[in-house]
């Protein structure tokens, strides 16, 4: 299950880690329309744009840390709450750091692979993951 989080940097792998009905829920405290959820197709486009704008001239354009705070597992589904810290180096806008929490829904496919069905974002005092993604929407 953790692999779905750790492979964000590869758009193809990330896309394969998303369920067909994946939904991203930005922090509800963001101003409208930024607080509106989006689906898999838009998520793939955002991640593609984000990856295209990373500054690959630095040794580590993306640094992601997360801690699983709680986890619930069932035979064919799971959820986990994480605390995250993400730092990205972008070519045109410099470094951006996101801190927050997320509630992640997962489903076990018939082939045994886990896929992400949802990510509900809760920002900390800094930018959230959703706010960084909105820069590339």
Image (tube, rainbow, N blue to C red):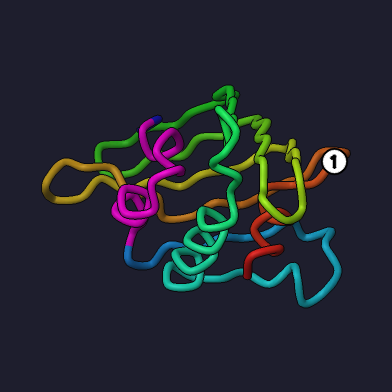
Q: Between 108 and 35, which is closer to the camera in this rendering?
A: 35
Residue at 49 percent across and 55 percent down: it is: 118
Residue at 86 percent across and 69 percent down: it is: 31
Quarter of the image where the C terminus is located: bottom right
Tell whether position 9 is magenta: yes
Q: Position of residue 63 (x, y in %)?
A: 59, 30
Residue 26, above or below 56: below
Residue linked to disc 1: 126
Name of the residue lying farthest toward the bottom: 33
Label 1: which secondary element: loop
Is residue 99 toward the left or the right of residue 54 in the image? Answer: right
Q: Position of residue 48 (x, y in %)?
A: 47, 61
Q: Between 16 and 57, which is closer to the camera in this rendering?
A: 57
Q: Position of residue 88 (x, y in %)?
A: 65, 40
Residue 18, above or below 106: below
Is residue 113 toward the left or the right of residue 111 in the image? Answer: right
């Amino acid at each position: 299950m953790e692999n779905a989080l750790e492979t964000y940097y590869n758009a193809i792998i990330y896309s394969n880690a998303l369920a067909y009905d994946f939904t991203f829920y930005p922090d509800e405290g963001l101003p409208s329309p930024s607080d509106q959820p989006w689906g898999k197709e838009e998520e793939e486009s955002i991640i593609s744009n984000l990856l295209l704008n990373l500054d690959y001239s630095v040794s580590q354009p993306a640094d992601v840390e997360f801690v699983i705070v709680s986890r619930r597992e069932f035979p064919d589904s799971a959820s986990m709450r994480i605390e995250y810290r993400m730092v990205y180096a972008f070519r045109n806008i410099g470094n951006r750091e996101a801190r927050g929490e997320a509630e992640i829904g997962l489903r076990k496919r018939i082939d045994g692979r886990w896929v992400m069905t949802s990510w509900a974002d809760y920002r900390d005092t800094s930018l959230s993951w959703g706010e960084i993604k909105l820069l590339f929407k």
